[in-house]
Amino acid sequence: MAEIRLKNLAHSYATDPEHTTDYAIHEMNHVWEQGGAYALLGPSGCGKSTLLNIISGLVIPSHGSVTFDGVEVNDISTQDRNIAQVFQFPVIYDSMTVYDNLAFPLRNMKVLESEIDAKVREVADILELSDILQRKANNLSADQKQKISMGRGLVRDDVSAILFDEPLTVIDPNLKWKLRRKLKQIHERYNITMVYVTHDQLEASTFADKIALMYEGKIVQFGTPRELFENPNHTFVGYFIGSPGMNLLKMTLSEQGAELGGITFGLNAEQRALLQGAKNAELTLGIRPEFVQLSAQQNEESLPCTIQHTEDLGTYKIVTVMLGDHSIKIRLDEEQQIPTQDAYLNFPNQWVKFYADDYLINSTEGEATSE
Amino acid sequence: MNKTQNNKAWFLVLPVFLLVAFSAIIPLMTVVNYSVQDIFDQNSAYFVGVEWYREVLQDPRLQDSLMRQFMYSGSVLAIEIPLGIAVALMMPTRGAMASLSLIVLAIPLLIPWNVVGTIWQIFARADIGLLGYVINGMGIDYNYANNPIDAWMTVVLMDVWHWTSLIALLCYSGLRAIPDAYYQAAKIDRASNWAIFKYIQLPKLKGVLIIGILLRFMDSFMIYTEPFVLTGGGPGNSTTFLSQTLTKMAIGQFDIGPAAAFSIIYFLIVLLVSWLFFTTISQLDKDKSKEMSHES
Amino acid sequence: MSRRKNVGIWAYSVFVLLPVYWLINMSFKSNEEILGTFSLWPQHFTWANYQVIFTDPSWYNGYFNSIYYVVLNSIITLIVALPAAYAFSRYKFVGDKHLFFWLLTNRMAPPAVFLLPFFQLYSSVGLFDTHIAVALAHCLFSVPLAVWILEGFMSSVPKEIDETAYIDGYSFPRFFIRIFLPLISSGIGVTVFFSFMFSWVELLLARTLTSVEAKPIAAIMTRTIGASGVDWGVLAAAGVLTIIPGILVIYFVRNHVAKGFALGRV
């Protein structure tokens, strides 16, 4: 099977890369463990498709190596890497029936027809394609076609990893969840390493055990959906994950505490110690809209704010407030009351994160991770 | 596209309609007129009904010419289609070489048809032409002016040289329209080159090939200038095709009645083929829009 | 595999270029040399043949005539086809499908069928032997093609753009010229290319409808049999000169044509 390891991997599409901007993938080291379901999440242009193509062999990296179970595969062609890839739009052989489409890879490998038949029927069963096996492939709906694409990857016994490049893009929104569930079923049944590229965080968090969040050619965080949510180690992670994303407030350190453009946020000793080591960096305070407390009562640590705007989205509300110069979004449950006159914010310490030059200042390390 | 119903759109279409009507309907009426009359001189013309049509259809010159025409169209299609596809597959896909090969390929299409005839007239001669000289030099007797078989082969070769590029360019653009993902998927599925051709490229070329085949059939069916310049229709009648026969009758021999009837028949054959063309294309477009509404 | 492809495409290119090279070769030889010795390149390089063409009005007028009516044809075709294509693209109207089909059938009409009637028609309106006659006659074939090609390009421009322009206060002519035309510029390029391609290369109609004044170069070439036999050198030079405009046109519209072919509308 496949543990996929990326060592000192970097890639530039230019022939003579000079500046960092020439690189689509900046140098990285990463391990995808065998049998995991991973999402490669990030905005357009962050390099996730490039990374996927490097893993599958459609792109040869300009620097570094890719190894499958310890064997370097840089020079091994795609077809010999024993992977399957599902593309953004369904790729099927129009002139063939569904059956022949699924059988195609096996026939190319000269497998016995009887074995092919068994395997094709098995996969068709899982993907719920059994009753259309004899139909011509080109008249089907997009989600059925995508299932066929996935099926071609599953029929092969030697497949050690399946890579998905935004496979639900052309699927009807109300059918997407069905396919997602199908993918999870496949993963549980076959125990194959799966890497799923998407720009949709909902897709990523429902599919994957662990998410690799990419930004500008780097994997900025790799962890469970929950870890990414509760402890983003980069401002981009905070911003990208969550709806709406994390509130990021530029701040400076002063005697009284954190200066947030007019408002002073009191710091306790622990927080002060953290920030002391990163005095010369650009500092940002981050807190998720879910964790900001809004109340009409003032207390010792609360900060006065003015309410700008409320959006009622059914089961929850988004309230936009002004805190000094900063605009802050707060996410409240539908029953929670919104103050009509005076409003005060509380930032619970356990959810306040500090970032130096966009990287999380970690209490265990005591210093910013970037120098 | 959601088109709005508006009959005033006829104003926009009027210039085209008038122009084409002027150029097409009036002359056509004239021809039909001639085809059903026997005209001796300015004043005496009388109605003969379908007599000309009958005479024309039984005229051996015409029947021979029609046979030769079908053989000609069949031969050139049989060579140009596969050759065109092969050339399209071989063409570079990007870079300066791609532009260069496009230009080279387009050259035969832009040469006035009589110059095409002249080029091959010179090229295939034994005394002053490279092809004729070389073939005869190899000991093979080759003279397109005297030998009907040589004449046929030269005419066909000339057409292949002239028009294969059209098929090649059509297929080339058809191939460019295939997204990379198909080739990538085929690689992953370990398909052989032949399988890629058979299952990915050829099906995707279906649309352009139908257009190419029908166009080539029709244009070759109407061919006049190139064989006329090259062989004059000879030796004897061996390379006289339909258009030339008609022109000889209409202009040369002033058999207006039969010529007119012949014209109408000729036109009807082509109309039949255009109808096939149109319905196939609209069928294809319908399939395409069905496909697209599935994907959305 | 790439190797084989390259060899293949080189071989085909040689096949295409060889006869053309031979013509060029001939054009730089004198008649004596042509009929006397056989050589792969001119032994006695001469410009004489080209000189004949550039100095003899009966030759160079042929070129002017041809270019004149080809340009005329392209202009008329565009002016007439643009509004019609727009109508087909944006509107439904009584008889629209039938009209479109009828237009297409004209593209497929054998020119030979129209010989006699055209001859009589243009003679009777006094347009025989004029450039406009040839230009108009060619319109029968180029206009349907133009409407077809332009309609294809226009249909890929969403109607919303038209509507937005009207909301923004554009009058129809202003919208058409300032906004719409630039959007379909490659369509116009393709149309000009195909109009040119058909009109420049056609012989039969052009020859039939002209005698002296508007005689195209193609017709002049077909009667170069002088007292001393065919003037091969001059004929070759004339031929070479007819290829040049074609190469120029294709060079300028090469990018547009690739796109046009892709729509499959030839």
Image: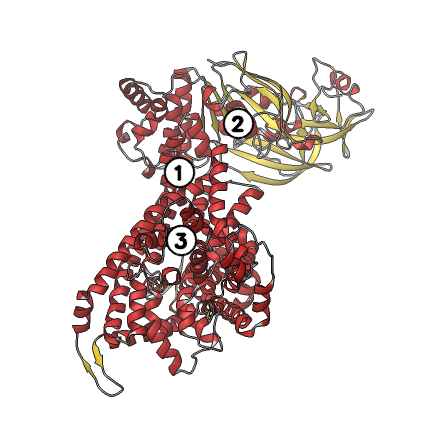
Q: Which mark is residue B201?
A: 1
Q: Looking at the image, which is closer to me, A79 or B121?
A: B121
Residue matched to label 2? A53
Pointer 3 and pointer 1: residues touching (CB < 8 Å)? no
Up the image or down, B166 lies above or below A222; here it is below
Residue B27 location, quadrant: bottom left
Q: Which mark is residue B10?
A: none
User: Can residue B25 be seen in this snapshot?
Assistant: yes
Residue positioned 36% across, 49% down in the render: B141
Q: CA distance from mark 1 to mark 2?
A: 23 Å
Q: CA distance from mark 3 to mark 1?
A: 28 Å
Disc 1 marks a residue whose amino acid type is: Gln
Residue matched to label 3? B158
Label 1 secondary element: helix
Q: Residue furthest bottom?
A: B43
Residue positioned 34% across, 49% down in the render: B210
Q: Point out the frontmost of discs 3 and 2.
A: 3
Disc 3 marks a residue whose amino acid type is: Met
- Looking at the image, residue A342 sits to the left or right of residue A58; the answer is right
Q: CA distance from mark 3 to mark 2?
A: 47 Å
